[in-house]
Image: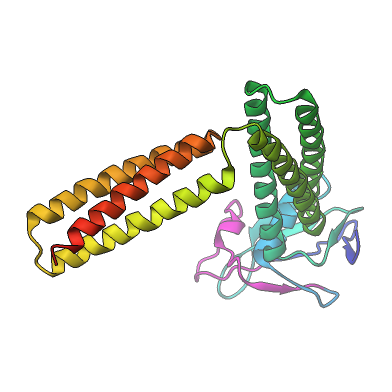
Amino acid sequence: MTNTNKLSKIAVIAVVFALFSAVAVPARANAQSYVNPNQVIVLSNGKTITVQTLLDVINTLVAQNRVGTYTGTYGTPFGGTHVGVYGGGTTFNNNYNNSDRNDADEAIDDALDAFNDLEDLIYEAEDENVNNRYIDDAEDELDDAEEKLDDAEDAFNDGDYDEALDLARDAEEIAQDAIDELEDEMDGRSGGDKNDARDAIDDAEEAINDLEDLIDEAEDENVSNHDIDDAEDALDEARDLLDEAEDEFDDRDYDRAEDLADDALEVARDAEDRLRDEF
């Protein structure tokens, strides 16, 4: 690990002060609960980290039995607590900061989501009797993504957030590429054209939005309630048809999805024309 600062084998290397009242805290009090997590600490080499980051480092090292900690009261005029670290033979990265940690954590979550999506898609491909060659390729990519993800989590637990971030992004990319390839194969086996179905759904959504806007305008223009009610009934019907079209699209029945979207478009446009005549 680069840019490291060795911990002394016996010396206390960090003391965090939490000045919070005029009464000293008992020795068994939890110092962390009184510390301002955003307070900046200057290390002996001039580097800076926040209190929360330092505490994260301490907790990681203690969990690995690489250092010990102690807490107690600190004799300032204001009272307070301190937490120290002792032990040795270990290092930590001076580039620790909260944003690096959060970025790595989010990247791992994204990679895990992509991994799970790929796993689900493989099961779906098996149910649809997709050629085993494509499924085997996807499973190999799944294994590669899992290995990268495990390495990312290990790096994160070791406090190497830059490495964790890179590994997590690699894992997500591997999984997403496999998803794209397998979906392309599954789409090629499906009925109808995917792009035509998507365009039809988009057109239906636009028509439904136009009808909604016209209904709002009709209410402002004092169009009869009967005509508005008819338009709202048509709007509900168009929405239902669009929902069905979306479901069929998700199931890769693009012919059916396109037909349902076209029906939704027709219902919405007809209702819009009838309502507009009443202005």
Please, what is the dominant secondary structure of the magenta stretch? Answer: loop
Identity of the residue drawn at 75% across and 45% down: 177
For residue 264, what is the image quadrant? top left
Left or right relative to 173: residue 272:
left
Name the spot of residue 57 as percent of width and height, x first: 74, 56
Is residue 26 rendered magenta in the image? Answer: yes
Observer-nearest of 172 and 213: 213
What is the quadrant of the N terminus in the image? Answer: bottom right
Identity of the residue drawn at 65% across and 31% down: 189
Name the spot of residue 11 as percent of width and height, x first: 85, 61
Q: How is the image coloured?
A: rainbow
Q: Is residue 238 visible?
A: yes
**Against 182, is 177 above or below?**
below
Name the spot of residue 196 as percent of width and height, x first: 54, 47
Observer-nearest of 274 and 89: 274
Identity of the residue drawn at 80% across and 74% down: 47
Observer-nearest of 221 and 149: 221
What is the quadrant of the C terminus in the image? Answer: bottom left
Name the spot of residue 190 as percent of width and height, x first: 60, 32
Observer-nearest of 153 and 67: 153
Q: Residue furthest bottom?
A: 46
Identity of the residue drawn at 55% across and 62% down: 34
Q: Is residue 64 visible?
A: no
**Against 178, is 61 above or below?**
below
For residue 119, what is the image quadrant? top right
Is residue 247 rendered magenta in the image? Answer: no
Q: Which residues are magenta?
A: 16-43
The total of numbered circles placed on residues is 0
